[in-house]
Structure formats: structure tokens, C-alpha cells
């Protein structure tokens, strides 16, 4: 777990590193103005690709892969224990739980895409039309739409019983693993 957290921090630092370096290169002289604007535009496109479009591809691939694995796993289990599961209610329960898990993750991903994609697409449009007031206003409002995603996520997670119980255990420190070993 510590390795994952370290990886997230290192990735965040590497993604923001070009911005930190270039901010010192911005000057107020007229001769360097064109260079500074090009550098900032390149960073905007770089940030959009690194912070949204590449993770979006990974997210979609992962979600589709998980859905396929769950379906295949259900079919294998159903074939192996068909004789044991005389009760169709048990089958329906397992199937509904799997469907619910896939639906929850799909909803989270769709909401994430709908709320953040306008901002990142508009940031690339802003690179082409930085002086356009409509583009500037849309970029501002789409940025707030993306931030609103953070407010909506807890509501989306709250509709899943497993997430609710996991968060309840985490927030009250009642998890058996947490109580035995403490934070890791």
C-alpha cells in the first residue's frame, strides 16, 4: 500500500514538474513573450493529455476488462455448481450483486467523463483561441463543473451498500484489519 501511495505522489510531482520549471522561465519582456505563450500552451496540452486523456483510456480499458472478467467468472461458477444451486433465488442474488457492482463503477466513470471532459477539451480549444471571451468563460464554468464531480462522488458511492459499509468501518475505525494492525 505504501508503494502505491508513493507511486501516486511521484507521478503527481512528475506531471507538475514541467509547470514548475516553466513558471520561472516566464518573463515580462516583449522578445520572450512569444516563447512564454508557446511554453504555456504546450503545458496546457501536456497537462490535458497526462491528467485526463491517458487516465481516461486506462479507466475505460480497466472497467471493460473488469466487466468481462465478472461475466466470465459468473458463467464458470454457474457451470461448475449448477447441480449445487437448485435454488434459482441464489443465482439471481449473485447475478444481481455482480450487476450492481458493474453498474456502480460504470455510473462513476460516466459521471466523471461527463463532468471533466468539457473542461479538458475546452482547455485545448483555449490554446487555439486564448483571446476569445466565450472560450475563457466556458473554460471557467467547465472547470467548476469538474470540481462539482468531487461533490457528487460521495452521493454516487452512497447508493452501494458495500461502499457504505466500507466507509462506515473506515470512518469509525471498526475494521478488523485496522483494529489489529493500525494504519499502514
Image (cartoon, grey):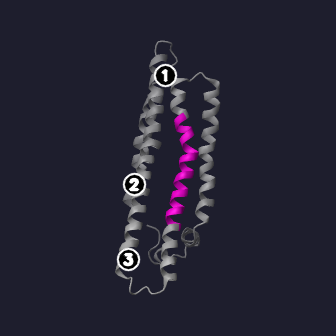
Is residue 119 found inside the magenta-colored segment of the image?
yes
Q: Which label belongs to residue 29?
A: none
Q: Quadrant of residue 42?
A: top left
- How packed mark 3 is, by other alpha carbons closer than 10 Å (few <14, some 14-19, many 20 or more), is few
Between marks 1 and 2 in the image, the one whose residue lies nearer the viewer: 1
Residue 91: percent from left, percent from top: 47, 79
Magenta region, residue range: 100-121
- How packed mark 2 is, by other alpha carbons closer than 10 Å (few <14, some 14-19, many 20 or more), is few
Q: Earlier in the sequence, mark 3 or mark 1?
A: 1
Residue 50: percent from left, percent from top: 43, 41
Q: Residue at x 48, y 70 (%)?
A: 98
Say which residue label 3 marks. 77
Q: Residue at x 41, y 72 (%)?
A: 74
The alpha-carbon separation of the residues under discs 1 and 2 comes to 33 Å
Say which residue label 2 marks. 6
The alpha-carbon separation of the residues under discs 3 and 1 comes to 58 Å
Residue 65: percent from left, percent from top: 39, 58
The alpha-carbon separation of the residues under discs 2 and 3 comes to 37 Å
Is residue 47 found inside the magenta-colored segment of the image?
no
Secondary structure at numbered mark 2: helix
Q: Earlier in the sequence, mark 1 or mark 2?
A: 2
| Along the viewing direction, whichever of 124 and 66 lies nearer the viewer | 66
Q: Which label belongs to residue 37?
A: 1
Give above or below for 184 relative to 43: below
Q: Earlier in the sequence, mark 2 or mark 3?
A: 2
Q: Is residue 113 left or right of residue 17?
A: right
Q: Quadrant of residue 25?
A: top left
Q: Is residue 85 left or right of residue 174?
A: left
Amino acid at each position: 500500500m505504501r508503494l502505491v501511495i508513493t507511486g501516486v505522489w511521484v507521478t503527481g510531482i512528475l506531471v507538475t514538474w514541467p509547470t514548475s520549471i516553466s513558471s520561472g522561465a516566464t518573463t515580462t519582456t516583449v522578445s520572450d513573450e512569444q516563447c512564454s505563450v508557446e511554453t504555456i500552451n504546450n503545458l496546457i496540452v501536456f497537462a490535458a493529455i497526462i491528467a485526463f486523456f491517458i487516465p481516461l483510456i486506462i479507466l475505460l480499458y480497466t472497467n471493460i476488462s473488469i466487466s468481462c472478467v465478472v461475466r466470465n467468472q459468473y458463467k464458470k461458477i454457474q457451470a461448475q455448481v449448477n447441480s449445487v444451486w437448485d435454488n434459482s433465488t441464489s443465482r439471481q442474488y449473485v447475478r444481481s450483486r455482480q450487476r450492481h457492482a458493474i453498474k456502480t463503477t460504470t455510473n462513476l466513470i460516466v459521471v466523471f467523463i461527463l463532468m471533466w471532459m468539457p473542461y479538458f477539451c475546452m482547455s485545448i480549444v483555449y490554446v487555439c483561441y486564448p483571446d476569445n471571451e466565450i472560450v475563457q468563460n466556458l473554460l471557467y464554468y467547465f472547470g467548476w463543473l469538474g470540481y462539482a464531480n468531487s461533490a457528487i462522488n460521495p452521493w454516487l458511492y452512497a447508493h452501494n451498500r458495500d461502499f457504505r459499509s466500507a466507509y462506515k468501518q473506515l470512518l469509525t475505525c471498526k475494521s478488523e484489519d485496522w483494529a489489529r494492525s493500525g494504519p499502514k
